[in-house]
Image (cartoon, helix red, strand yellow):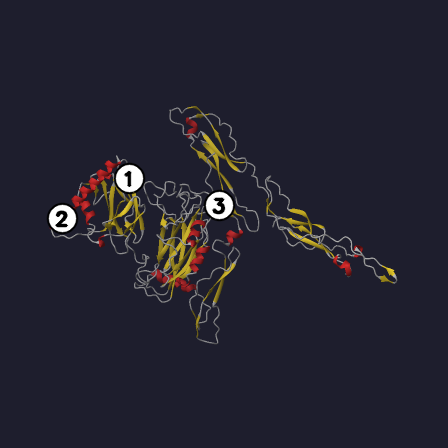
Amino acid sequence: MGLQMYSLLLLYYLISSLVCDAVAFAEASEGISDVYCERILRAQTQGTRRDGHHEFRLRMEGDPETYRPGSTYRVVLMATSPAYFRGFTLIALKEGREGTVEDDYAGQFQIIDEGETQFMTDCPPAVTESTPRRRTRIQVFWTAPAVGAGCVTLKASIFQKKIIYFQDEGSLTIPLCEKEHAFGEATETPEMDCCACGTAKYRLTFHGNWSEKVHPKDYPRRANHWSALIGASHSKSYMLWEYGGFATEGVRQVAEFGSPIRMEEEIRQKGNEVMTVIKTKAQWPAWQPLNLRAAPSAEFFVDRARHLMSFLTMLGPSPDWNVGLSGEDLCTKECGWIQKLVADLIPWDAGTDSGVTYESPNKPTIPQDKIRPLTSLDHPQSPFYDPEGGAIIPLARITVERIARTGQQCNVIPDTLDDIMTDIGHEEKKEDNIPETCIYSEWSPWSACSSATCEKGRQMRQRMLKAQLDPTVPCPHTQDFQPCMTPECTVEETFTCMMSEWISWSPCSVSCGMGMRSRERYIKQFPEDSSLCQHQIEETEKCVVNDECCESIMCSHWLEWEPCSTTCGLGTRRRERMIKMPSRDGSICNAEMAEVEKCMMPKCPIDCMVSDWSDWYECNKSCGKGHTIRTRMVKLEPQFGGSTCPETIQRKKCKIRKCQTKTKEETREVGGKRRRHGKAGCRMQSWTSWTYCSKSCGGGIQERFMYLKKRVKGSLENNCKDRKEIRACHVHPC
């Protein structure tokens, strides 16, 4: 069977080659020279030409009517069941072009699966099959051309046995035109230097739209959040991240863990390439109405050399998924600064983790993949999967609005009323207590916060004194300070309760009529001062289920509730009922035949937790038999019947060296009499009081001493020494 198939394919290509050669000969005889990609063009015009009857379709993700220059799109060629195709070609031509020269082709294709697709040998801009075989779908990336290319057309040819499907219009053709830019809108990836003058100040506002209502598939109900947003205004010679590039270590830590610390270090290391570091705090939970929480925002500056803006923020939990903008140009072609930019954001994959669901286990991608947009066709288990290949609903929207301009402006188009009012508003906020004889430079960006933790720190900005016209008038205030904390910490989050978003309402307690339902939330973070959270963690309300169901059927009494699904903590329980008599009109009963509700069992086994043992303390004797101790602290007291705490002090014997119990007698003549000196000759004072404990909590030690009353000389000097004892104290946890 395999040999027969191979023979048929070989015969097919031989016939195709003969046809192509014949046409080429005919063209040559008419004086026409070889043209670019002539083989594929002949294949399009020769053979059987049909409309396909919608068996085949060329599809661009999101079904756009326009393209954005430089942007990348996923293109899918598919066949409806039971149709299939063996081979294909895919090209993208500029409007009105025939494909006879290289400049006729628009954009660039990118191979996704080398086992399925490859670039055509004799026509590099075209994509074709890697091997001829039955298939129902292929996909590639297409990067749109640069600004000014105009309208383009994506065309596909389908080869099925001896039939060639090709269309100038219809389901195998996608016409696209370049998205027009209104005055004041940002330019695309900059191909030339910015010509704007002065500086501009912007406010970036992040509006999260990632919620269970908008993105219901597998939405994580617990711990859903946006990480701290991190970005910068920068020059075009430095890119924080970009599609098709590889994630830096800083980008990886944001993408996988939501930590902006390393990313900020990378940004600040770029020195003069960066004008402002852009930061906002994290958002827990990911979505809340604006009347409960204001959208996070940050202000930043741009100038002629640093006129691009980039940022990213992680959606968590997720493998390595983020949203953001890369290299967004705020300089206009008219040498001005854009007034307002609004962009909807879809998720992208950092290429560092191979998970396909929100809560996939960590699985590093080795080797690391390139950064790419997520699509609705990535994986059937993806929360964004759509078998039709539709566009992903945006997860967030970013608004960047100019709030001030400083310095002389050089925009070609005269200022609008909005421009003038913006500048006037900025001037009204300027300090009015600066002496007129003092001329300063602009303030520098704020420095990094002096605190690396959630403790309050401060940050500084500076400006230079350019001129002092009157030496007798002092020019103060060249430095400015303000309180700060690290980006992921705020006063509200540090010192108050942090509550989760409400979990969805439980089912109604009845199947018809009026019942009750409830919902819960949990405490994400307790206050630092160890006070109790007073926020409500459970809500109940009345609910009504279809009243008519009670009239149309006769149901038995509910059976007893089944045991709770857990032995401790929060669980669920279930009960059922049976229909005694069907409805009068014979219709199917719509009443609920089973109910599930939450049940709370006694709170679970919180056991005592203790720290590791400390090192053994010094022996309490200098010679002979003594003892030493070691301690450990209680980290968590037992609750709700948990196991009790084990011992926190251990004692063991110790022996430094053997004490000399007998000493040689010393004799000497004292008034003609012999005196005898031995151990009894050591005269000691009483024990001192115990010292203060070395720690106020967590396990310390106390000491006490016994000193010699009088020093002796001779052989007793080695035996008569001061003594010391130790004991543990304050072993309770801190």
**Horizontal relation, residue 531 to residue 461: left or right:** right
Q: Nearer the viewer, residue 713 or 569?
A: 713
Considering every residue shown, the one lying at the far left of the view is 30
Q: Is residue 380 visible?
A: yes
Residue at image mark 3: 500
How far apart are labels 3 and 1 at the CA level?
A: 45 Å
Residue 467 picture location, percent across and down: 43, 73
Q: Which residue occupies 47% across, 71% down?
A: 475
Residue count near mark 2 (Cα–Cα under 10 Å), binned few <14, some 14–19, many ≥20 = few
Residue count near mark 3 (Cα–Cα under 10 Å), binned few <14, some 14–19, many ≥20 = many
Looking at the image, tell me whether mark 3 or mark 1 is earlier in sequence order: 1
**Horizontal relation, residue 111 to residue 665: left or right:** left
Considering the numbered disc 3 on the image, is that residue within a helix, a strand or a loop?
A: loop
Q: Which residue occupies 32% across, 41% down?
A: 388
Which picture quadrant has residue 465? bottom left
Looking at the image, tell me whether mark 2 or mark 1 is earlier in sequence order: 2
Residue at image mark 1: 136
What's under tag 3, amino acid-wise?
Answer: Ser
Q: Nearer the viewer, residue 530 or 643?
A: 643
Residue count near mark 1 (Cα–Cα under 10 Å), binned few <14, some 14–19, many ≥20 = some
Residue 53 picture location, percent across and down: 22, 38
Q: Which residue occupies 51% across, 55% down?
A: 453
How far apart are labels 2 and 3 at the CA level?
A: 75 Å
Considering the numbered disc 1 on the image, is that residue within a helix, a strand or a loop?
A: loop
Residue 578 picture location, percent across and down: 45, 25
Residue 25's disc is 2
Nearer the viewer's eye, disc 2 or disc 1? Answer: 2
- Count the marks: 3
How far apart are labels 2 and 1 at the CA level?
A: 35 Å
Residue 393 picture location, percent across and down: 36, 45
Considering every residue shown, the one lying at the far right of the view is 672
